[in-house]
Image (cartoon, rainbow, N blue to C red):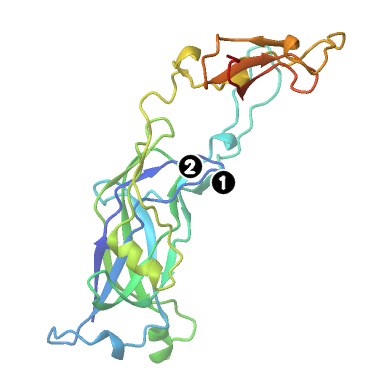
Amino acid sequence: RYQLEVVQEPIRARMCGFGDKDRRPIDPPPVIRLLVLTEDGTPVPESSVDHSTMIVIAGLWSEDCKEERNLVINPSSIPAQPSCSSSSIMSLNAPLCTRNLMGHCTSSAYLLNDHMNRLGIFFIFQDLSVRTEGTFTLKFSFCDVKEPLFHGFTNARGIVAAEVYSSTFRAYSAKKFPGMTESTALSKAFAKQGIKIPIRKEARYRRVNDDLPDQTSESSKPSSVANTAPDNIPDDVKSDDNEDDILEKQEPSEDDAVVVFDITRENKGKFITRWRRRSK
């Protein structure tokens, strides 16, 4: 007999709406572990189990685990009400439903070591997203597709041998989403073993003042000396390469660097630094 255990619970998600361009996965990715037991409840070693035909299917359910939430009405398919002056007939077609749980809802079995270096059979759901805002739970159903064939049922589907529900999680709107959490030790351990799972070194939180304009004043921003000089010099300004065409910005002292404003065509009005000694 089989038993499922949720070893990594979902915490939060950002609703993706009814478009597919900006889809964020549930964070952290749910991970399910399979326990294979004998009739008397003795655990069977994972290395001796043929897991090549085992799968787990994820479904979206209500917070109390009583109602399925896998489908949702697409708002674009709802017919608009005609105005009073319009003579057109309102469409009687039923609104179209679409999937509320997006991504890869089925996971194959993986024989991996967890972050404690314990061998196990795991099912990883790193690509699940929710379209609508709300509080949900995930239902995971396990089946071995070879079982009907073993019993001679060639046209039968896989028999659900075990089920488990996750803890509740919330799907936020884009403005209320608090950000992605830091990747767990379990996710990092699976990524090192070749599982394609997104890894983040630090938690990414949304700043509270993201919607406010930048209050940094221009005076507080660092500026180089070159940025304060004029960009263009008129073409009619002509000078020879001598010191009379150099306007000193400050009185030089002996053996000090002289910061001067050069208006020659070569330097185009930039502050430059020159070393010179006063003649005695």
Which residue sits at x=41%, y=85%? Answer: 146
Residue 218 location (% of width, % of height): 50, 14
Give the x, y percent position of residue 136: 31, 46
Q: Do the numbered discs 1 and 2 sit on residues whose CB atoms are within 8 Å?
A: yes
Q: Judge left or right: residue 89 versus residue 173.
A: right
In the rendering, which numbered label is found on residue 20? 1
Tell me the residue that label 2 is attached to: 16
Q: Residue furthest front?
A: 280
Kind of residue at badge 1: Asp
Query: Measuring 28% from the left and 77% from the top, which residue is drawn there?
Result: 120
Q: Is residue 273 above or below residue 261?
A: below
Residues 158 and 182: in front is: 182
Percent of width and height locating residue 267:
74, 22
Q: Quadrant of residue 41?
A: bottom left
Task: Residue type at mark 2: give it.
Answer: Cys
* Callout 2: SS: loop
Q: Is residue 35 above or below residue 11?
A: below
Q: Residue 109: where, in percent of width, then height?
A: 38, 76
Q: Secondary structure at mark 1?
A: loop
Does any portion of residue 140 appear in the rendered image? no
Of the pair 95 and 186, the residue shown nearer to us: 186
**Going 38% across and 34% down the picture, which residue do you hit?**
206
- The residue nearer to you, when weighing 278 against 147, is 278
What residue appears at the point 36 percent right and 52 percent down from the top-left corner? 201
Report whether 86 appears left or right of 215. Answer: right
